Amino acid sequence: MSSSQEQMQDNLPQQFRAAQFTREGGELELREARMKEPRAEECIIKVCASGLNSTDQILRGDRLVGVDMPVTPGQAVVGQVVKAARNGDSKIRQGEHVVAICGYGGAAEYVLADESMMAPLPRRFQEGEHMLEAPVVGWNMARIVVTCCAHPSFTSHRIAVSHERCQEEHKQRDEREREHIRRRNEEMGFKGDGCLAVYGQGGYARLALETLKAMGVRERLVLVATSDKWDSDRYSIKREDVLFLGRCDVREELRKRGGAEGVICVDMPKEHIEPVMDGMRFASTMVVLNPRENDQLQVPLANIIAKCISMRGSPPMCRRDMENAFKMAEQHNMRMPVKAYGFSEGSLRQAWQSLESCAEFDAPVVKVSAV
């Protein structure tokens, strides 16, 4: 270990500042937290930036099993490893800049993360605005990739992983199953291969569409916009493929496009979700990525049963999924729509309010420190 690495470990504080919810439904507070001893497979990261996501609302509502108040939001961070894992299986070393999925605890000066859930941060994302975009790439974009790879209707880290899993399931169907599904769709009035829909609004919806395009999905992309706060020009698809709920017959518009083979929900399915499911194909899939604590999930069971619709969350992610998401972002020169907030109690509450109210097109990212 070099002298600089030894100094880095020696300078680890016993206490540090963290944004915390101290009671169910309470406001974020900036409080002192105690440094925990990491497990053998965990690293200690000095946090530079942490993304906030509506999934964090589960924490505020005290809904995450095994996690007690006070609790710190922030599921993805970028920062510097100040203490490497004692029993790691990768080449991540002390002093390295990384992106990490920590589950919670990211909106703090330091966080623990399992080494298997972090990846080296590409040079492009180590400074400036690109660094603030990195938590969004590591969490939101990667989940879409995983989603799309898990089902036949998706090609495109959270967005991407989901697509991979769907493709794998499709390959397991034999020819008779595929013919049965094709025939049932024709009987329901769905022709051709159908379309792939994103349900939501704002920057997360645009990121989902851009990720799917970068992955080369063969289906036509459609946005079912849950708000008309932002014009269709803000999204990266044709104007006629942006369907505003309440302003058009979403059911009929999806049917015109062959029906939705898959729907990726970057917002909670709630009001007006029934016309969307009416426009979904037989044996299609809906993936829900982001819950909202104060909204009730509204899903018409008749559609799910009659059409054999699968409904799920995103599959688990790993280091490989994050690496793939960053590789894709670099190859296609993708920019993430983010807005930076400072690490003060007032700024943290502003970031949280923006998240809850969907007041901003851009995703809220907390800039904790310079590394």
Image (cartoon, rainbow, N blue to C red):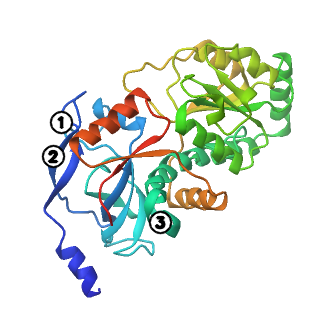
Q: CA distance from mark 3 to mark 2?
A: 28 Å
CB within 8 Å, label 2 to label 1: yes
Left or right, 9 with respect to 73, comes to left
| Mark sitting earlier along the chain (2/1) | 1
Q: Secondary structure at mark 3?
A: loop
Any mark on residue 322, and which? none
- Quarter of the view holding residue 263: top right
Q: Amino acid at mark 2?
A: Arg
Picture residue at 58% right of the left edge, 17% below the top: 273
- Look at mark 3 in the image and give the residue it sits on: 121
Is 8 or 298 nearer to us in this picture?
8
In this view, 150 is above or below 299: below
- Look at mark 2 in the image and give the residue it sits on: 31
For disc 2, the neighbor class at 10 Å (few under 14, some 14 to 19, many from 20) is: some
Picture residue at 69% right of the left edge, 14% below the top: 248
Q: Amino acid at mark 1?
A: Thr
Q: Secondary structure at mark 1?
A: loop
| Mark sitting earlier along the chain (3/1) | 1
Q: Amino acid at mark 3?
A: Leu
In this view, 233 is above or below 145: above
Nearer mark to the viewer, of 2 and 1: 2
Left or right, 318 with respect to 150, comes to left
Q: Position of residue 143 (x, y in %)?
A: 54, 46
Residue 314 visible: yes
Q: Position of residue 171 (x, y in %)?
A: 75, 45
Q: CA distance from mark 2 to mark 1?
A: 10 Å
Left or right, 8 with respect to 355, comes to left
Quadrant including the N terminus: bottom left
